Image (cartoon, helix red, strand yellow):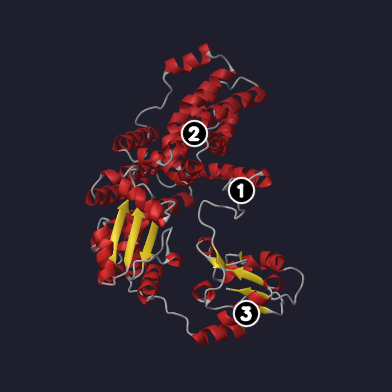
Amino acid sequence: MGIKKAILLSLVSVVLAGGMLWYHHRPLAPPAQATWEDVTGEAQRGGYRLITTEELGRLYQKDPQGLLLVDTRQEWEYRSGHIKDAVNFPLEPGWWGRRRAKSPLAKLLGPDKDRLAVFY
Amino acid sequence: MAVQLGYTKIYRDPLGYPAWEQAGLPGARTPYGLCNDTPGGPPSCLPSGWALLGTFLGIFAGGLALNLTPCVYPLIPITVSYFGGHSGESRGRLAGHGLCYLTGLAVTNSALGVAAALTGGLLGGLLQNPWVLLAVALVLVLFAASLWGMWELRLPGGLTRMAVKSYAGYFGSLFMGLTLGVVAAPCIGPFILGLLTWVASQGSAWLGFFTFFTLSLGLGLPLFVLAIFSGSLDKLPRSGEWLLWVRKLMGWVLMGMAAYFLRPLLPEAGWVALMAGGALAAGIHLALWGRTPATFRPFGWLKGFTWLGALTAAFLVVGFFALRGPGVAWQPYSEALVAQARESRKPVIIDFYATWCTPCRELEDITFHHPQVVKQAAQDFITIKIDLTRKGDAQAEALLQKYQVKGVPTIVFLDREGKELKDLRLVDYLPPDQFLGRLAAVTKSP
């Protein structure tokens, strides 16, 4: 390797390392809590409806069999406590997670397109 | 955005389980260590039937992946030199020898699994013993020196002769495998800590044996292939600029491993100096040393990239060390401290850790040294650390029971009343921004 090339690459490495150090030490804002408007907007775009805890509680107590409860949190969260009879289906955020979830989710929900399912 | 599947009655409960639990509606939990809720049945996590086969296939694949670690490097030249001597024999017989060799390797490595199963978590502690670490590092440095051509790695003549004479034929190959397994076993230990812990928690020597046997079969498969073809390997051109360079690189990877093993023994500054110096030396040796002009273009590029990578790594190591502020100020556990926290209505962070656990170290080095995390913790929290590196401390054992801690790392958050916030509990590495989110959730809870 020529001296010129070595020096040039050394300079590049200084810039690279500096960039990584800056990225790691950049100030962080704690993740914002989602507001109710965010949640309703998301539901509209996603084509699903929202349900409150009370309503869900009523539905559950009336007919626990006619209702599929899906816990989309991580497995360790599900283990530490979940709605009784809920099944765990960990969903990863991001388009890749959604894409991968598609066919196992369809299997979980079954062929009946009018089935009542609640995600949380 | 959501997954679109065409169902009509899909709802989301945005408040989720915490609100459900608060409303006093029925919930259920599956504690760690229990895999089924069936009442009366023995708590068992052991898969059976096809699932068991799947598990073992996974372990085998994991063993194959272990070939990406440098633990097998020292075995490559030995394998070639041993099987090169068998080159006159037929493919079938060579395959038989290779199989015996592989079995021998696997049996020795399986001792690790049995030891883990019988001694519980002790093995993790043993891998942390300073003398063991020093010895492993030393052996790695020796092998690196051999790859650089400073000395020729040869089996002691006596050993080879003994293997061939006293256990003629296939037994010789088996014996070789048994002996050489010793080289790889301590080296792969840190990479499979999770598997060791799992085996230890199951406590069955047979399961430990078969788990590690399968793992070693995966680990040794490339060596098996190498054994069969090592006879024809002799006919290949031995050296060449390219091959020598690859050997140099493998040597440096082994040196890196040695540094990794030495880490717990050195003070922070010494380790940083060692790493930075090592990266620089590797860069010079691999990219600048030797004036042979690059014979083909990609090789020149490769050297350029190596130089860039080595130098960047050296700068990063020094930079991180120089810019690192103080970490979270941890205190040892005491009942009085927790009571005091409850009185002053401060939430508590309890960090269960062990020095041999990699995610614990990541948490400490990155998350618990992030200025905002440090500030937030000092302001609003009482911070307690419990060291589980060595077993047998009565107080630590009692705390493990009390908080149902199943492994390290485990980070427990107590609210202002001293009750645990179970849904916030952490059992893995979490980057600083998300950790700040958890801290915010803790301070918000009443």
Q: Which of marks 2 and 1 is in front?
A: 1
User: The disc numbered 2 marks a residue on which chain?
Assistant: B
Q: Nearer the viewer, residue B205 or B24?
A: B24
Q: Mark 2 points at which residue?
A: B114
Find disc 3 in the rendering and name its residue: A58
Question: Which of the pair B240/B314 is nearer the observer?
Answer: B314
Q: Mark 1 points at which residue?
A: B41
Give the image location of residue B260, x and y in percent.
Answer: 35, 45
Q: Hey, what amino acid is under mark 2?
A: Val
The reply to whether the C-beta atoms of the residues labelled 1 and 3 are less than 8 Å apart is no
Q: Where is residue A95 in the image (x, y as percent from the top left)?
A: 58, 71
Between marks 2 and 3 in the image, the one whose residue lies nearer the viewer: 3
Of callouts 2 and 1, the N-terminal one: 1
- Give the position of the N terminus of chain B as an image quadrant: bottom right
Is disc 2 in the same subunit as disc 1?
A: yes
Query: Where is residue B391 shown, x and y percent of the image?
Result: 35, 43
Left or right for B256, reference B17: left
Q: Can residue B307 be seen in this view?
A: no
Residue in the foreground of this view, choosing between B211 and B77: B211
Q: Distance between the residues labelled 2 and 1?
A: 27 Å
Of residues B301 and B178, the one drawn nearer to the viewer in this rendering = B178
